[in-house]
Amino acid sequence: MKQIMAVLILCVLSGCTTNNKEELAPNPPMGWNSWNWFGKNDINESLIYGVIDALVDSGLKDAGYEYVVIDGGWRDVKLGENGELLAHPVKFPNGIKPLADYAHSKGLKIGLHTVPGTEDCGGDPVGSYGHEEIHIQQFVDWDIDFVKLDKCKFRDGWDENTLKDTYFKWSKILTEKSKGKIVLNISAYKWRDWYPEVSQMARTTPDVGARVNSNWSSGSTFELRNDTLKKEGGYYSVMDIAEENNKWAKFAGKGYWNDPDMLVTGDHGLTFEQQKSHFALFCIMSSPLMLGNNPIEMSREERQIILNKTAIMVDQDPSEQGMRIKGNLHTEVWAKHLTGGRVAVLLLNKNNDTPMEMELKLSDLGLSGEFFVNDIFQEKKLENISDAMSYKIPQGASMFVLLSKK
């Protein structure tokens, strides 16, 4: 008993560090990121205040979207005389701390984009390389809850050993200084096997096409692009993203989540049906649900998608990252086994010209017995099944269902 008390006293005096990753991100993080809609040039502190209010007033906060992440554009174009980060003097004249305080007062959390190299993505010399202790202490002092650490640029060019060492260094210092209270989101554009060791979420893919880069990629697209188009355009379609992210499903869970980039619901270029399929795919894949929209101006249709309680429940269930279980040129079936013996299933018709009859046997899911079937987006009960289900899926659309044991 004396030994236990001694440990507790030491912990109180020194400040305990949370080393259990599951405590910091037991479920895929949810929130909003400024980049896909506003990019680097169109953000400012007034806008972020408006977004914070919109997340609360729209019901997004109550639905679980708790992180407000300010991406590139919040920094000045240079570091301070001591190597410290500076807020942009025109766009963020009052700095970041008042925004963090306001977000916290509304029951939200706040995050910042930063870069571990020598320059940001636009070439400004504001990287944290060699200044990690200073920058991380600033984040702690500002009460930041989430850091998106974007690979971007290194003056000598990144090699894999330097990249790994830099991210490990960041993780160690961030954990120590914040006492394990800041989520680390690695954004380095492809999977690496050390991600689960150092972060709570990490990008497995290149950037998805979005409104902000529409001059280069025509906004968001849904269908798989060929390799030449991907190399020329740089930006991935929703299905490119899902294809890549699916490869690393077995590594997700227990406080680490694969990040297939931000969502592109809203006016990014996808049809309403494609937005539903996109959101369902991300929920099946247990993806961090980071909105890339304009929450100040959302259509009724977009709200229906991103506020769907059952879809969010599927995403937040920490059982596993769901996977594609079968597919061909025109159709795919994705599934996620949830706690309580339930299974979420996405029947996806990629054919934009023809409706497709899709059948799935319970044995394909490793199931037997009788199950209730609920249509997640229609929010209605369908017929019970005991062998197989078969539905005609409209062209370019999908059906997202939840199976529950009868």
Image: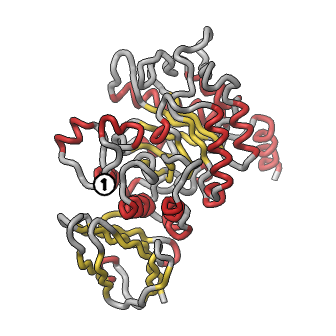
Q: Quadrant of residue 385?
A: bottom left
Query: Residue at position x 22%, y 37% from top?
Result: 231
**Which residue, given by chain and number where applicable, does mark 1 sit on?**
222
Q: Is residue 30 left or right of residue 244?
A: right
The percent position of residue 329, horizontal first and vertical second, equals 17, 64
Q: Position of residue 287 (x, y in %)?
A: 45, 55
Residue 235 at x, y = what percent?
31, 40
Residue 8 is drawn in which quadrant?
top right
- Residue density around tag 1, few if under 14, some if 14–19, many if 20 or more, within 10 Å: many
Q: Is residue 232 above or below residue 251?
A: above
Report whether 107 appears left or right of 119. right
Q: The residue under label 1 is which amino acid type?
A: Phe
**Image mark count:** 1
Q: Position of residue 176 (x, y in %)?
A: 63, 33
Q: Could you tell me which residue is drawn at 49 percent across and 33 percent down? A: 149
Residue drawn at x 36%, y 60% as measured from the top left: 274
- Left or right: where 311 falls relative to 62: left
